[in-house]
Image: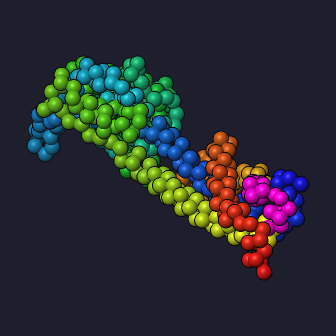
Amino acid sequence: MNSYKRAFFYVVRKKGKSLTIFFLLLLVTVFVMTGISIRNGTEKAAQTLRETIGASFTMSGNIDSLKFDRDETGYNAEKIPVPSQTVMQILSMDGIKAYNAQQHSFVQAEGIDYLSGMTDGNLSANTDTACQMDFVSGILELSDGRHITAEDKRAAIISDRLAEENHLGIGSEMILKSASHSRQEQMKVRIAGIYTSDSKMEYDDDTIFSSHDVFWKLSGQETSAYAGNVTFYVNDPEELNHIVMQVKQISSIQWDDYFIQINESEYRAVSYQLQTLERLTGILIFAVMIVSVVVIAFVLTMRIRNRIHEAGILLSIGTSSTEIAMQFICEVLTIVLLVFIVSPILGNFVVGLVETELKNMGNAISMSISPKVTLVQFLLEAFIIVIVVIAASLPVARMKPRDILSKMS
């Protein structure tokens, strides 16, 4: 009878011992498999986070002048405008995916009752309202219609409360007028969208978002510059600081007149949880693998050394030490093969439970057991087990039958 047959019959005959090894290997395999799935899931979630939430930096001009009211109870701070040519120059750099230029002024709306009861309301002109910070952060949400883009002219977005108060809807027209007594400009705009503000936040629902042509017409500002903030969004938040350094190296920009503010707090706050989970999972996997190798090595070593009598008989009938070691290896590999047939089924069940629990904790992480990773794990565990079995078999295989019998007696 060859080593393979003896190994098979031994596994079948010694059901208790075989099941002990089986459940031990199954527990270790599923634990490591689940840990790897969590780690891979957090890596994918972090990548998705970088692509969706992103991060940005805002370029603003320094204060150029202060204009006080006639009664000197208030003032208006005018910033150095950011030229559109500068904006296009920065936008052309690698790693920047979008931008939004924002300008503010006060306007009057003919026939419109502001919620505050005031005659003036805030006008926020934007290149792309989908990239406006309040919409990005979730303070505002577009409930109807569409966002304003760079191609829009005479377009506006108002709040649902202001629309309801004045019986306005998508496609309705308003006449906006300059709030400055020195200017008598006015412009008819069409409502392209309606937004809803977060009830938990105190937001001025009188704010009207518009395209830049409305601001330039009513304020009299030059149309080739933005008298406000320009926010640039990057593809990968991890490259944000590097991109900002490159922007500051543009020699054609008079940096004494401008400054840059980095906006990554939202991304850092969310990604910190994923990074912490990823680090803890990595440490846990490493610890489990070390402990598992030690425990499995101890169990297999004791199992083989308890079979000295069997090894002596095999040696006495002419079985070589290599064949005995091969039998021990085949026995364990048979159990390992069974483990890797069952482990993906049990692993998917456990991963599903962990995924559900993480979602309940507020971490929406999609996890799955990769066949490729499972195969690598199978080969690695099989290799480690073979090394352990060989190391445990050598002292027994090197002994002569007479030595074994004398030890037994």
Q: Is residue 67 visible?
A: no
Is 50 above or below relative to 344? above
Is 359 above or below relative to 136? below
Please give the name of the residue rendered at 40% of the width and 28% of the height, measured from the top-left corner.
Answer: 97
The spot of residue 51 in percent (x, y) is: 47, 36
Name the quadrant of the N terminus: bottom right
The spot of residue 235 in percent (x, y) is: 41, 32
Q: Quadrant of residue 256?
A: top left
| Left or right placement of residue 369 versus residue 62 in this view | right
Please give the name of the residue rendered at 77% of the width and 71% of the height, measured from the top-left corner.
Answer: 402
Badge count = 0
| Magenta highlight on residue 370 | no
The spot of residue 30 in percent (x, y) is: 67, 57
The spot of residue 311 in percent (x, y) is: 78, 65
Between 302 and 112, the one lying in front of the other is: 302
**The magenta stretch spans which residues?**
312-333
Q: Main secondary structure of the magenta part?
A: helix
Please give the name of the residue rendered at 17% of the width and 37% of the height, measured from the top-left corner.
Answer: 76
Between 148 and 47, the one lying in front of the other is: 47
Q: Quadrant of residue 392?
A: bottom right
Q: Quadrant of residue 372?
A: top right
Please give the name of the residue rendered at 25% of the width and 34% of the height, measured from the top-left corner.
Answer: 245
Is 252 above or below relative to 73? above
Q: Residue furthest front?
A: 402
* Coloring scheme used: rainbow
Name the quadrant of the C terminus: bottom right
Between 304 and 256, the one lying in front of the other is: 304
